[in-house]
Image (cartoon, rainbow, N blue to C red):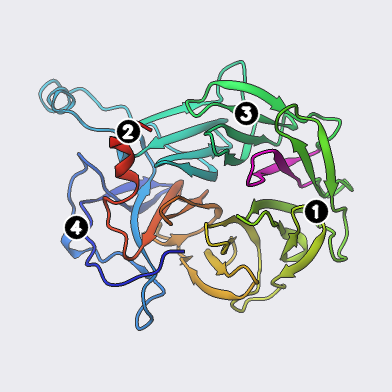
Amino acid sequence: MKHAGSVAPTLSALKTALISGLFAFLGGCAGSPELGAHDFIPPVYPPPPDTPRFIFERTLLYNDDVEEYSGYDQFRTFALGASRKLKGLVKPYDVAVRHGRVYVTDSVQRAVFVFDIPGRRFFEFGNQKPGKLSKPMGITIAAKGDIYVADISSRRVMVYSAEGHFLRAIGNKNNLVRPADVALSPDDKRLYVVDTGGIDSLAHQVQVFATDDGHLLQTIGSRGAEPGQFNLPLQATVAPDGKLYVVDGGNFQVDVFSPEGHYLRSIGSVGRMPGQFARPKGITSDQAGNVYVIDTAFGNAQIFDPEGRLLMFMGQRGEAGLPGKFMLPSGITTDEDGRIYISDQFFRKIDVFRPYTLGAEEGQAAYLFKGN
């Protein structure tokens, strides 16, 4: 993580949206009406009196959270009575980010939605043949930009280009039962697929495939409660040093494996104290090797160092959908600049937090001028 000094952040706008019958205040963008933005104080983590490390930056929900609202669009809306078409998330599950592009799987709309922040555009893919998704879940991005999506219903992993063009599929019903998440080795040569299995299945494991030709290399784990075994594994991440971290949902812990797949240790235990888990689900790691774990029951993310020691937590359970408040958080990722992105299925949103010393226009905006 990038840690911090003191910058007085600003927020350009706030808006309200009706979400599941509740009002959620969302971080605005260009063209959004200002609604008392000067009264809004973005939450910081950890809260005072501790030194802040992260601050709420924005919420992503609709296409107009990133798309530029041109003068012509405004003319059509106000002078001609034209309506602006909104397209947004319905049930976002997981999130991945590269160069300011935020890729979100939506299990109800059966597609991947892309909030291209520096490009100021919104698009979707995976909803047409070839490469049509049945129920997308976990998502990850290779260093060169290819997108890997776990399709739990079709029992395979779909691979797309950065623009959403279908490239190939990995895995099938002979070696995958319920693929729920994907992760890549640091060299992108090994694809780790979390197979949740299910209540009636013994296939609670991680299948390792070669990314070049898709052949099965290795199976990690089996069903059980012993070290190195899983009970309903859900999501996984690979740290920069190659270690594999797997959320073991039914055993209420995170299991850690060497790059070769050997069990090393576990993080956490069942409970309601900091460092424990009640319903762990999403997981990611940052460039420093810190590990971020979503707990759906707590409505927060707990951050651990590479040795498994709790550093801090961020977010909390809430029923109003306000920034930093979650009801059903499921996915989490970090980007090159240290920003944190958390998806919430109930409030249909992605909340974005940036390191406290990183300016609002730093990092992502730079890619707009690099042609990436």
Dot placed on the residue nearer the N-terminal end, 2 or 1? 2
Amino acid of disc 2:
Gly
- Residue at 46 percent of width and 66 percent of height: 315
Q: Which one is closest to the eye, mark 3 or mark 4?
A: 3
Mark 1 → mark 4, Cα distance in angstroms = 49 Å
Dot placed on the residue nearer the N-terminal end, 1 or 3? 3
Mark linked to residue 37? 4
Amino acid of disc 4:
Ala
- Callout 1: 10 Å neighbours few (<14), some, many (20+)? some
The magenta segment: 177-196
Mark 3–mark 2 CB contact (< 8 Å): no
Amino acid of disc 3:
Val
**Residue 283 lies in what quarter of the image?**
bottom right
Dot placed on the residue nearer the N-terminal end, 3 or 4? 4
Dot placed on the residue nearer the N-terminal end, 2 or 4? 4
Q: Nearer the viewer, residue 213 or 10?
A: 213
